[in-house]
């Protein structure tokens, strides 16, 4: 083990089994002391008080706890925290700029893509990573990118449309989801 | 919240340090953690110290050389799929990797981890409390394999999607310990036993995977089919990986086939070679192989779907995979969630 | 008090559909911003200083007497703060007054694997869990029961002594009309057996509760609950503390679907632990524990016999059901009735006999899940209709259209039907899917299936007998122009906060952002019974409308005096108040409130909602009535692979009679979510159990209590959906609204089974429809056997003497003809007689337009 590593994971006076470090979350430095076996999920929620990141299984099976590490979606429930020291961590709290909603947040709120809102933070983060990579993803790409996230409320359709809407907003394109998503399909005569 | 037990985590930055740490006491290896952490949270795998390989730079490489492709153990599954050359050379391998779990877990899980992934069983992948209520099972603490109560062995099934196709493509792996290094064909790393499912010793580290260029798409045609309930997240309940080498006139010169999730190890269908070599792939020969594969598959009641149906589906999926290789149109409806590399 | 507007919606100035400003528009949900920013505070997001973390020790055996609980190893650990065992919480509880059979912690007996028996509080959850694992429990095992059939053959030992008979918790037999005579008139009688597997809600948020002690007998409980009022009652009973000293705050729920509508052990335990230790106590369940709380869909077996005339009309029906209830009562008595109650609400059934029985088994308790008790018989009914259509040579859509119940009629089992848009629903999905061109004509392997359903818009009666409002709203207004709305409702994601806000904003002509909500807080908000039975839009909506109209009237009265214009001429719109004929005379809403506050003093109004009294007067008539019913029709297009049984659903067309969509985006979201959950149940979701070989083990365990192995459709697995909103403006609902959260789930399962029949000629009489089952049916067909999969025989069960009730068509009066216990005239409960209730209703009922 390198000297640098040792300092990261068990610095001066930190008891065995604990880690003291600084996490870079949403571009801000969070000094944290946590039990070394606590995952990023636990440290974000319990040490950083960033409770926007949710959990639905803690076993990597539902996607609710997804956050970005160096721009890539990972499941924070299976992300050992010591592995992300020094990396850039992004959570739902970092999406909005000051008090302005991110286009994804706007689209999700307006299209009913968030119902109970519990899977939403995870889905927003995975979608954000996708939009960073691809300014105009199609339905298949969105479906695949989000396929690790379970939503029990919406039936997914609005989420896919909201991601496309947000992508359009980001591009400055005035595309918006079909009218039927706002008023129902036209009743056939 | 389900949490990990207290553990010591070591993150050495050299392989030598890792090998040294691994030779001590109750120690386990971790790479992406997508297998070990759930298992430890449920308490059916335990360790005082976990040695992470993620700080060892030389393990995180993908090198598409002239004679082979080398992939370091900690290259993530996402890295593998994103590598254009890997996708070009070994499309069925890329497809298999793209079918593993879900995208965020592929950003975390590594190829080495997937090759060594613990065997699975619905009597085993349960919490400590749940396992207490069945008095545990043969794989962990108990006396009986609940899948086959009279059986002296454990019937947990192999859960790796990369293993069958890599076995079919003649991949080799390098194992390093504090006492030395060895290389062996990947297929020889697997043992058909749910408990001792790897020939890799506990003190050995799988460092590298090598796929020969002779298995690439210009030399051989390969296919991977996977049966699972949903289009993502789910493990295989059965999979078929096949590679076929042909001469210029489409006559088969060599063929390999492995079945996943229907045994404790990837199950070789050796007959594929005997049936196909010297011939072109035909409907009759496909039917013959499919029939044999069905006999070889040993699906047990240890995962999703009924075992007997998984057996029948082996025949269908072997047929589908071979038809794909032969360029024949699919016989049957493909599931909505066709395997694709996106 | 003069009513400014007191005529039905469409005749009111300012309330015709075109003039509504908020209602009917796709506005952003009021909690939308909080939900997309991570600001919504779910129960597990709360932390308090000195908080302890609780872990429950749960039984690892399915049925046993507890011989000893050895906590010593746990107590020896560092960081343990306190423990609880069953004796410390000796009072039983349960959602239904007739089945208060639960204890916060098992006292003598554990009844299923997962039944909690001790609680450990520690400074961290890590330590609490380690300690819980170190608790040693000695059990004396008892015989276990895994199914209804076993419950019937194993009357002893009884899981609960209060059961109707042996291990049969509840038996019901209700006979409406001349059932046998009806069958004699039939040209075709079909008898079929069906099975519907149990399923879990799988709300993404795992249950969480946190309690803060404020005195030695005063406590606040924050919880992920759909029904804070019922939790409040259970806490008072189990803690032995007056309800006035207990405050329950329902946090936003991360999904409920019925799974958070019981009072739960863990809610009582956090409160007790907080009171015992004098410090905040919190518990958050793991996913596995959520499967043990369960209260999900009952596994139900059904035997359905229906008589048809050649023209497809129905003459009589006899339905028998058995419910596998699990280890406790929960809502089970209601669930039992619900497996029969709504059978009459879609199609005319002149005579109807329902027999139902619920068994106790050593599994987690079943209860209410989206559609509560009705998706199972609906599946049976709609599949059987498809069979009848096939036998009679009538198009299945036409068969349904020929039998439709009519609006404003009373069914054979005494349910009052409101508006019914089922014809329009069927027309929409038939046209949308190209049914007439394609049904029965698609190539082998492809098929279409149709099914319909109805659901309640709120249960007519509360869970416990009382005549008080089922929903209450208070409004506080002051000179700031801000309007504070107080209501006991809880937001699960269904959009109740938005509906409440929209109704008040619409009436007062102000913006959504001018309203501050305070909801789901038993100290601060008037009682609303909770977010269950699809009751919130209608009941909360009506109470809110009434309270807002009272506020508007008050302001209008003061403003009319001030402006010297007629009160009736005043319009409230766009944050302004003005005379209709002279819009330029407008004043701001806040100015109007100042005028009213100056005139009347501090302003506040209330609204109450009590549903109309149902016409049924027989024992059991309390389950099924609703102010009005929603209707749905769905068509599914499926492709089936004949070699494997694998099938794929290409598209779902669904039409839903919602009365009026108060917010179409939210309404569509409820319909799409219902389709999603229906598809899950139709295709794969199963709360399944394993029983180990009896010679080796007595284990009876949940097969796969995880998100991975409990299969819930993901992004890749959803077909295309086409949703039609059908509006029938029901006068019983606010602005004409009915429910949308549950009804659209119901037609999905039978429509899939029917579509598979159209595709490959195989009848699947059970759900979920695994590909294995389809293949089994295909193989049977090829071998010349009956191309059907489903249960082979119905349990031999004696439901007892039926209660005979004459139908409205027979000139009945809603009472049973043969009930010795029926004479309850003049019986006075603490909350008064039915007569008192009716009078109270009349007095309060500007919002509730129909009483009988």
Image (cartoon, grey):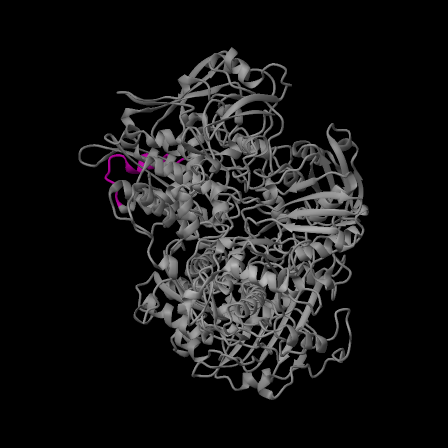
Q: Quadrant of residue C123?
A: top right
Left or right of C621 in this view: B222: left
In depth, the one of A22 and B12 nearer the eye is: A22
Say which quarter of the image contains residue C319: bottom right
Q: Residue at x 53, y 40 (%)?
A: A54
Nearer to the camera, B276 or C427? C427
Nearer to the camera, A105 or A121: A105
* Residue C802 percent location from the top left of the image: 68, 77
Is residue B132 something that shows in the picture?
Answer: yes
Q: Residue drawn 58% across and 15% down?
A: A11
User: Which percent across, then down, holds residue C367?
Assistant: 63, 58
Quadrant into which the C terminus of chain A falls: bottom left
Q: Is residue C650 visible?
A: no
Q: Which residues are magenta?
A: B268-282
Identify the residue at the far bottom of this view: C811
| Residue B76 sits above or below residue B203 on the image | below
Asked if C521 appears above or below A7 in the picture, the reply is: below
Q: Which residue occupies the foreground of this view, C70 or A76?
A: A76
- Counting the numbered discs, the total is 0
């Amino acid at each position: 083990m390198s000297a640098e590593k040792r300092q990261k994971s068990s610095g001066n006076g930190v008891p065995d089994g604990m880690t003291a470090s600084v996490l870079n979350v949403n571009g801000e430095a969070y000094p944290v002391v946590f039990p070394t076996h606590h995952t990023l999920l636990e440290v974000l929620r319990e040490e950083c008080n960033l409770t926007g990141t949710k959990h639905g299984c803690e076993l990597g099976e539902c996607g609710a706890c997804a956050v970005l590490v160096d721009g890539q979606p990972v499941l924070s429930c299976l992300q050992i925290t010591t592995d992300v020291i020094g990396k850039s961590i992004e959570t739902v709290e970092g999406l909005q700029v000051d008090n302005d909603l991110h286009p994804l947040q706007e689209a999700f709120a307006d299209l009913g893509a968030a119902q109970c809102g519990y899977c939403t933070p995870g889905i927003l983060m995975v979608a954000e990573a996708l939009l960073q990579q691809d300014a105009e993803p199609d339905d298949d790409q969105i479906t695949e990118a989000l396929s690790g996230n379970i939503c029990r409320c919406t039936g997914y359709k609005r989420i896919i449309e909201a991601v496309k809407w947000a992508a359009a907003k980001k591009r400055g394109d005035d595309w918006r989801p079909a009218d039927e998503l706002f008023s129902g399909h036209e009743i056939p005569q | 919240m389900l949490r990990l037990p207290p553990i010591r985590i070591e993150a050495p930055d050299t392989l030598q340090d890792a090998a040294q740490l691994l030779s001590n006491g109750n120690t386990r290896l971790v790479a992406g953690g997508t297998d070990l952490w759930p298992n430890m949270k449920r308490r059916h795998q335990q360790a005082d110290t976990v040695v992470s390989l993620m700080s060892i730079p030389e393990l995180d490489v993908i090198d598409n050389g002239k004679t082979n492709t080398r992939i370091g153990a900690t290259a993530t599954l996402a890295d593998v799929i994103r590598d254009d050359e890997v996708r070009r050379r070994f499309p069925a391998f890329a497809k298999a990797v793209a079918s593993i779990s879900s995208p965020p877990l592929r950003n975390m899980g590594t190829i080495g981890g997937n090759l060594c992934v613990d065997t699975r069983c619905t009597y085993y992948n349960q919490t400590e409390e749940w396992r207490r209520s069945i008095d545990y099972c043969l794989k962990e603490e108990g006396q009986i394999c609940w899948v086959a109560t009279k059986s002296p062995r454990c019937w947990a099934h192999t859960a790796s999607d990369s293993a069958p196709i890599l076995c079919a493509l003649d991949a080799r792996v390098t194992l390093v310990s504090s006492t030395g290094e060895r290389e062996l064909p990947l297929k020889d790393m697997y043992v058909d036993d749910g408990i001792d499912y790897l020939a890799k010793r506990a003190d050995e580290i799988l460092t590298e995977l090598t796929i020969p260029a002779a298995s690439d798409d210009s030399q051989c045609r390969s296919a991977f089919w996977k049966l699972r309930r949903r289009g993502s997240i789910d493990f295989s309940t059965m999979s078929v990986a096949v590679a076929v080498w042909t001469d210029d006139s489409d006559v088969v010169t060599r063929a390999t086939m492995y079945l996943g999730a229907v045994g404790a190890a990837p199950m070789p269908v050796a007959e594929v070679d005997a049936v196909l070599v010297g011939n072109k792939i035909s409907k009759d020969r496909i039917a013959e192989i499919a029939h044999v594969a069905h006999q070889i598959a040993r699906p047990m009641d240890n995962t999703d779907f009924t075992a007997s149906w998984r057996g029948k589906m082996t025949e269908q999926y072997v047929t589908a995979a071979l038809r794909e290789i032969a360029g024949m149109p699919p016989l049957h409806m493909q599931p909505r969630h066709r395997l694709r590399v996106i | 008090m003069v009513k400014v507007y007191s005529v039905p919606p469409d005749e009111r100035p300012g309330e015709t559909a075109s003039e509504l400003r908020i209602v009917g528009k796709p506005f952003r949900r009021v909690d939308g911003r909080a939900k997309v920013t991570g600001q919504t505070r779910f129960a597990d997001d709360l932390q308090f200083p000195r908080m302890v973390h609780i872990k429950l020790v749960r039984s690892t055996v399915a049925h046993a007497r507890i011989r000893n609980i050895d906590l010593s190893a746990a107590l020896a650990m560092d960081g343990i703060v306190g423990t609880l065992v069953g004796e410390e919480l000796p009072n039983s509880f349960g959602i239904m007054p007739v089945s208060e059979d639960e204890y916060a912690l098992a006292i003598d007996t554990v009844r299923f694997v997962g039944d909690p028996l001790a609680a450990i509080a520690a400074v961290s959850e890590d330590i609490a869990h380690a300690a819980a694992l170190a608790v040693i429990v000695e059990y004396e095992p008892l015989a276990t029961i895994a199914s209804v059939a076993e419950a019937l053959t194993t009357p002893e030992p009884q899981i609960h002594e209060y059961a109707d008979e042996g291990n049969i918790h509840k038996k019901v037999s209700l006979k409406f009309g001349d059932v046998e005579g009806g069958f004699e008139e039939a040209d075709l009688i079909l008898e079929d057996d069906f099975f519907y597997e149990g399923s879990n809600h799988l709300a993404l948020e795992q249950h969480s509760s946190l309690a803060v002690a404020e005195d030695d007998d005063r406590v606040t409980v924050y919880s992920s609950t759909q029904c804070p009022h019922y939790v409040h009652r259970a806490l008072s009973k189990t803690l032995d503390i007056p309800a006035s000293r207990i405050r329950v705050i329902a946090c936003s729920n991360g999904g409920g679907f019925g799974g958070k509508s019981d009072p739960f052990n863990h809610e009582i335990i956090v409160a007790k632990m907080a009171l015992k230790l004098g410090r905040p106590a919190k518990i958050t369940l793991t996913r596995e524990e959520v499967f043990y709380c369960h209260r999900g869909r009952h596994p139900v077996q059904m035997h359905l016999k229906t008589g048809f005339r050649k023209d497809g009309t129905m003459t009589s029906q006899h339905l028998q059901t058995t419910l596998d209830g699990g280890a406790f009562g929960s809502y089970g008595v209601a669930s039992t009735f619900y497996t029969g109650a709504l059978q009459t609400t879609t199609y005319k059934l002149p005579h109807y006999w329902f027999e139902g029985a619920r068994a106790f088994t050593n599994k987690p308790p079943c209860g209410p899940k989206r559609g509560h008790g009705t998706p199972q018989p609906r599946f049976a009914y709609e599949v059987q209709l498809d069979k009848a259509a096939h036998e009679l040579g009538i198009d299945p859509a036409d068969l349904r259209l020929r039998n439709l119940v009519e609006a404003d009629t009373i069914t054979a089992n005494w349910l009052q039907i409101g508006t019914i848009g089922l014809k329009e629903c069927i027309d929409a999905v038939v046209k949308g899917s190209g049914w007439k061109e394609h049904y029965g004509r698609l190539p082998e392997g492809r098929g279409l299936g149709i099914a319909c359903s109805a659901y309640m818009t709120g249960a007519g009666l509360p869970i416990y007998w009382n005549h008080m409002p089922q929903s209450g709203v208070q409004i506080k207004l002051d000179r700031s122009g801000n309007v504070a709305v107080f209501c006991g409702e809880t937001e699960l994601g269904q959009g109740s906060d938005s509906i409440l806000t929209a109704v008040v904003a619409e009436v007062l002509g102000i913006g959504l952002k001018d309203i501050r909500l305070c909801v789901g807080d038993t100290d601060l908000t008037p009682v609303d019974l909770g977010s269950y039975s699809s009751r919130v839009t209608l009941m909360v909506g009506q109470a809110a409308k009434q309270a807002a109209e009272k506020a508007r009237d008050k302001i209008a009265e003061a403003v009319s005096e001030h402006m010297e214009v007629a009160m009736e001429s005043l319009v409230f719109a766009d944050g302004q108040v003005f005379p209709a004929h002279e819009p330029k005379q407008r004043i701001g809403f806040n100015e109007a409130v100042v005028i009213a506050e100056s005139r009347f003093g501090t302003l506040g109004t209330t609204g109450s909602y009590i549903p109309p009294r149902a016409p049924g007067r027989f024992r059991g008539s309390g389950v099924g009535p609703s102010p009005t019913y929603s209707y749905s029709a769905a068509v599914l297009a499926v492709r089936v692979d004949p070699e494997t049984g694998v099938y794929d659903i290409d598209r779902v067309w669904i039409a839903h009679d919602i009365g009026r969509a108060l917010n179409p985006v939210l309404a569509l979201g409820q319909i799409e979510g219902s389709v999603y959950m229906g598809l899950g149940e139709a295709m794969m979701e199963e709360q399944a159990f394993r029983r180990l070989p009896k010679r080796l083990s007595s284990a009876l365990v949940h097969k796969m209590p995880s998100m991975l192995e409990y299969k819930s459709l993901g992004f890749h697995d959803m077909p295309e959906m086409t949703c039609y909103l059908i509006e029938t403006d029901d006068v019983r609902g606010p602005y004409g609204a009915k429910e949308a959260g549950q009804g659209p789930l119901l037609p999905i399962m039978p429509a899939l089974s029917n579509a598979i029949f159209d595709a490959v000629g195989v009848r699947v009489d059970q759900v979920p429809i695994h590909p294995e089952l389809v293949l089994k049916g295909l193989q049977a067909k090829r071998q010349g056997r009956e191309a059907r999969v489903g249960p082979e025989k119905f349990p031999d069960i004696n439901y007892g003497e039926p209660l005979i009730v004459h139908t409205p068509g027979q000139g009945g009066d809603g009472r049973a003809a043969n009930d010795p216990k029926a004479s309850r005239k003049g019986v006075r409960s603490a909350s008064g007689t039915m007569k008192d209730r009716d009078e109270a209703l009349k007095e309060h009922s500007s919002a509730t337009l129909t009483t009988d």
